[in-house]
Image (cartoon, rainbow, N blue to C red):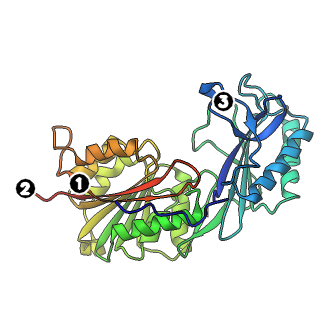
Amino acid sequence: MQPIAPSPALEGYRNKCEFSCGYDADRNPVVGFRFGTYKDGLVSVGAPDECINVPATMKAMVATFQTFLNQSSLPVYDVLTHQGVWRLLTIRASVHTNEVMVCVQANPSALDADVWTAAKAELVEALTSKHAITSFFVQEYSGVSAPEEDHPVVHVYGKSHIEEELLGLRFRISANAFFQVNTPGAEALYSLVRQFTAADAKTQVYDVCCGTGTIGLCLAADAGKVVGIELCKAATDDAAVNASLNNISNATFINAKAEDVMKNVLRTPRQGNDLLLEQAVAVVDPPRAGLHVKVLRALREVNPVTRIVYVSCNPTGSLVENAATLCGPETSNLKGRAFKPVAAAPVDMFPHTEHCEMIIVFERQPKN
């Protein structure tokens, strides 16, 4: 176990924040963060002024949006009555390119079309007249709980994406695509992943849950080939563009559920230059729920993968469960030689919180 790698930035480090629209304890409309969870009965929202992990530029945009809410004839959304219009303000701000994306979620289901059209125009004018916004989206949603990750958004202003730089590479980020929320922290994280992957020209890297391709493309200069797998179509589209942006020709991306295609991908016969590849390493960066059991079984069953570099945002939950499957004894439902953990490196991606990102390196055990 290595010592915790510190985040290079300790304050104002978040490049993405989702600010809820609601009411404070005195029933005044406010945009900021909820004081607790709905299931615990905490529905009041407070301004983010004292949150030290939120950049000052975002706080300024929140203040402008608060003024807009105060002047708007349309009410904020009430999570108790499920009525109201303005629901969520999402801001992405790139660190190295200074580009900004804004997405406002609203529930216009009770509005006439012309009223909603005018309100959107007022919203865009209110924010773009005060701040340098690169890209602006609106998401219409009338459901009670949060929408699916791929719920559609409507482009209303500026470019359709923003760009950010990581480890000397440039990445396009679309509205629905995942990107690490701490840019300098991500550079520290990916540098360690690169070190643990130890790829060379004879290595094929499988980037599972690849998002916009950030990890795989950061490894491409070392590896013989990179294959990324990701469910979100917008993310794999971005990944392909990102490969082109950086003149990377040895990376391909598959838009599918990893559990549906992993075994076939691992068993695909090698052809042409791929015949020169002698080892396979899987880099996995799953969401909090961890890897699907079918992905874990595929990694166990298909022998070419000799090392797994697992990046976990839930090291005390899903990582433990996934590690048990990767390292447990062979059974009728779990074929293939087991892996064993050989290295671990925590990274402080979220300063001033209890959360930490964890890298675990698993290596396949030798034959008996």
Front label number (3 vs 2): 2
Residue 50 — which label?
Answer: none
Taking the view exactly as shown, the residue that stands out farthest to the top is 81
Q: Amino acid at mark 2?
A: Asn
Q: Amino acid at mark 3?
A: Gly
The x and y percentages for residue 310 are: 37, 55
Say which residue label 2 marks.
368
Can residue 297 be seen at all in this image of the molecule?
A: no
Taking the view exactly as shown, the residue that stands out farthest to the left is 368
Left or right: where 90 falls relative to 351: right
- Label 1 vs 2, first from the N-terminus: 1
Quadrant in which the C terminus is drawn: bottom left
Query: Contact, CB < 8 Å: mark 1 with mark 2?
Result: no
Secondary structure at badge 2 equals loop
Q: Nearer the viewer, residue 148 or 233?
A: 148
- Residue 9 lies in quadrant: bottom right
Q: Can you say whether 43 is above or below 205 in the image?
A: above
Image point 74% across, 36% down: which residue? 45
The x and y percentages for residue 135 are: 73, 58
Q: Residues within 10 Å of mark 3 (few under 14, many from 20)?
A: few
- Label 3 vs 2, first from the N-terminus: 3
Secondary structure at badge 3 equals loop
Query: Gap between marks 1 and 2, in whole Å?
Result: 14 Å
- Label 3 vs 1, first from the N-terminus: 3
Q: Nearer the viewer, residue 4 or 266?
A: 4
Image point 21% across, 44% down: which residue? 328
Front label number (1 vs 2): 1
Say which residue label 3 marks.
143
Q: Residues within 10 Å of mark 2 (few under 14, many from 20)?
A: few
Say which residue label 1 marks.
340
Left or right: where 220 falls relative to 198: right
